Image (tube, rainbow, N blue to C red):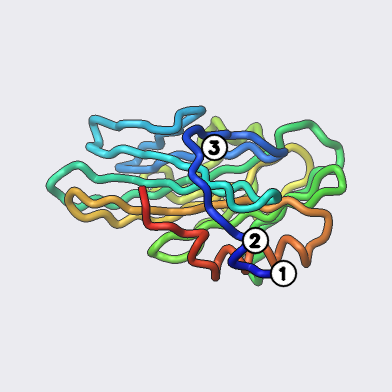
Amino acid sequence: MNINAYLHAEKDDGMVICRKSLIFSPGLWVNGKVYWLDDAREKLLPKEEISIKIRQPNIHSKVEFFDIFVTNHSRNSKDAKLILMQQYSETANDQFSFVSPSEDVIYHFADKRIYLVNGMNSTGRMKQCTVQPIWNLSTDRLWSCRESGVLSYQPMAKGAAASLFSLDLEMGPRETQKSSCWSIEGTEKNTVINLNHMLLKNTLAFPDKK
């Protein structure tokens, strides 16, 4: 297989939040507050002087890929955290999700399908990975310390659950930081792992255009 021919990015004017069985929900932690984008493709946070823009390139038929651009519009440097959540879109009795520290990925297993979740930006790969029951998502139990942006760590969950991880953002004045995250669907673990390695290595998966 020719990797460069197989992994190609095509611009998509719209954003599909849930094309497959995992729902992607991005949020931004800044100054002790969390702003979820819901179904929006762009969002301006006037009080924080920050904007967020999301694009979804077409990388591969088994991959849901998102580029997230966060812009600091102020004259001062800002630190923030992207909070990236994935959860299974349907109710399934055999759902099982867990963090794999050795592979630095998150797995969801449901309906005999495997979903690998990962992401990265200029500061590195995903941080603060956790898997939480869905009833924790709208409560303070999601956080170990909301004021400092620390998620409550839980390595695995059986049943209806969501995986979350963060990416650190260190933005200078008037600077835009780009992050990318993805989920890969398959029936065999080796297949999704190989696709993940391709995404990490192939520069076409991380275009510079905004």
Q: CA distance from mark 1 to mark 2?
A: 7 Å
Q: CA distance from mark 1 to mark 3?
A: 32 Å
Please state if 58 lies on the left or on the right of 186 as rendered.
Answer: left
Label 1 residue SS: loop
- Residue depth check, mark 1 versus mark 3: number of the one nearer the observer: 1
Mark nearer the N terminus (3 vs 2): 2
Mark nearer the N terminus (1 vs 2): 1
Q: CA distance from mark 3 to mark 2?
A: 27 Å
Name the residue carrying label 1.
Answer: 1
Neighbourhood count class around disc 1 (C-alpha, 10 Å): few under 14, some 14–19, many 20 upward: few
Name the residue carrying label 3.
Answer: 25
**Residue drawn at x 23%, y 52% as measured from the top left:** 175
Please state if 206 lies on the left or on the right of 162 as rendered.
Answer: left
**Residue drawn at x 30%, y 42% as measured from the top left:** 31
| Amino acid under disc 1 | Met
| Amino acid under disc 2 | Tyr
